[in-house]
Image (spheres, grey):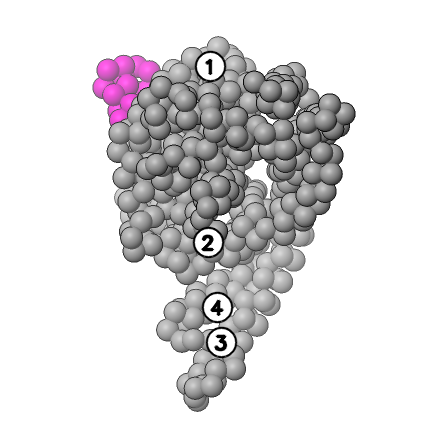
Amino acid sequence: MGLPELLAILLVVAVCGLLMAGYPVAFTLGGVALAFAVLGDLLGVMQLSLLGALPPRVFGVMTNEVLLAIPLFILMGVMLERSRIAEELLETMGRLFGSLTGGLAISVTIVGVLLAAAKGVVGATVVTMGLITLPAMLRHGYNARLAAGTVAATATLAQIMPPATVLVLLGDQLNNAYQAAQLAEGKFAPDQVSVGDLFAGAVVPALALVGLYLAFQIAVAVLRPAACPAIPPDPAAPHGWAMAQRLVEVLVAPVALIVVVLGSILGGLATPTEAAGIGAFGALLLTARKVAPARSGPALAAIVALVALLALRSVVDLRIGRADAGVLHVVAIVAAAGLLAVAAFGTFMALAAIARTGILADALGATTQVTAMIFAILIGATMFSLVFRGLGGDEMVQRALAQLPGGVAGAILTVMVAMFLLGFVMDAFEIIFVVVPIVAPPLLRMPGVDPVWLGILMAVNLQTSYLHPPLGPTLFYLRGVAPPQVTTLDIYIGVIPFVLIQLAMLVVLWSWPGLATSLPHALAGR
């Protein structure tokens, strides 16, 4: 091993050590990488001029259209949280299934799926569910460990269920790695793996994981009914037709938003960024209707106008300046302009209504804070990746993985085990920005490794980093909002069965890669 390779190893060790000590991720990545770049230049193993490539890379990060989806998806999730749509969903579904043994846990999981698809942010989901459902489950006699484990595990579905923010970041990093791997093999017109591919690949595994959660909860209800008793019926609660009407009222809006966002991506009608814009727009209008029902007319008109515009776009080419444009085309463009005007007016009125309640400023502040954190980490990770490659670390990792016993399977298994272990001390963002750029290019150069399959394996693996003790972020979020009678030990023990379920899902994905690749290939016509 030469001096450059030794410095590359020490660079990774130093970063991991400082992250474990609690130093800020973005400053740790950038600062340590800069220190090792100077050290490498002094020792004559790396040219400091290599850092001249950093400004163009940072500019590329900040102008990346794919990453623009992150603040939009975050805004969509925060708006739905602040509007209390999530609370109504949880309350209604709890009444629907609560009369069954284990029914409340099942309803929490089902609502968790909807919240995960609507929010895409783990922290917001776990706080919402922890504040609403955990006290209710304890009040109705649920075992504290089962209740805590159910809430924590269901909230982490926001990481694997599209449009998860983690999938957007992982998709961007995997695309960079995939192109680097192809260029290293001499393919100068490389293929791409898009965030949409990763979204499509995650749908079936995410639903399968939900199915395993539900199977576990049903098994507990059968074997240990005292741990999850049925809820006594509430005479004041709606029944029969009134209950069905209430269910439709709380389900239609969020489900429609999810279908529009994911359907537009999977159907190829919109990029993830465009779909995120639609999602944020829809969340704003739904929030306006919720917080100011007396002034909901313009918001409703905007929703109708948007739907009509999308329908018009699906049957008429609305591009201006066509040589073969006829009267019908001109009429369609005029109608589209009118619909846009209605949507713009409705949006303005909706923003004004939300601003009066203080929700808009709160949501924008939360969105800005999370987005700034993510992009600061990404810029630091760009610096780290540049220095690591400058020291020859990527070639060293390529040789190490190629020499592992078991070939391709042995290399992937080693990486999966390493990521799982790192999850005990690092969160998903840190692993995506530190580990994935190092290991993904050499893995993708190996024969038979599908980038979508590898990405979904990593995503499910990273999901465990939110759950497993001692440093899973979900555990800290839940500890902060849990009632006093729920101890930290209850939370730690409660999540263990769900961590094991996630590991079982990894084994299933390993054995049947088609679970992750079939839908993306079908949508792409391959």
Q: CA distance from mark 2 to mark 4?
A: 41 Å
Which numbered tag is attached to residue 492?
A: 1
Residue drawn 59% across and 50% down? Answer: 64
Q: Is residue 238 magenta?
A: no
Quadrant position of the N terminus in the picture: top right
- Who's the residue at 59% across and 58% down the image? 350
Q: Amino acid at mark 2?
A: Ala
Amino acid at dot 4: Ala
* Residue 119 % position (x, y): 49, 42
Q: Is residue 497 left or right of residue 301?
A: left
Q: Is residue 202 visible?
A: no
- Residue 274 point in image, percent of width and height: 51, 57
Q: Are marks 3 and 2 in contact (CB under 8 Å)?
A: no
SS assignment for the magenta stretch, majority: helix
Q: Which residue is mark 3?
A: 319
Task: Compare marks 3 and 2 and give the one earlier in the sequence.
Answer: 2
Q: Which residue is mark 2?
A: 189
Which mark is nearer the camera, 3 or 4? 3
Q: Which residue is mark 4?
A: 305
Q: Quadrant of residue 514?
A: top left
| Residue sitting at the far left | 222
Of mark 3 and mark 1, the one earlier in the sequence is: 3
Which residue does the image show at 41% across and 22% down from the upper left? Answer: 403
Numbered disc in front, either 1 or 2:
2
Q: Amino acid at mark 3?
A: Arg
521 lies above or below 347 = above
Q: Distance of mark 3 from mark 4, alpha carbons?
A: 19 Å
Report the span colored magenta.
214-232
Check disc 4: other Cα within 10 Å, few if <14, some if 14-19, many if 20+. Answer: many
Which residue is at the front of the view, 175 or 300? 175
Helix or strand or loop: what does disc 4 sit on? Answer: helix
Instruction: In the rendered view, tell whether residue 32 sits above or below residue 324.
Output: above
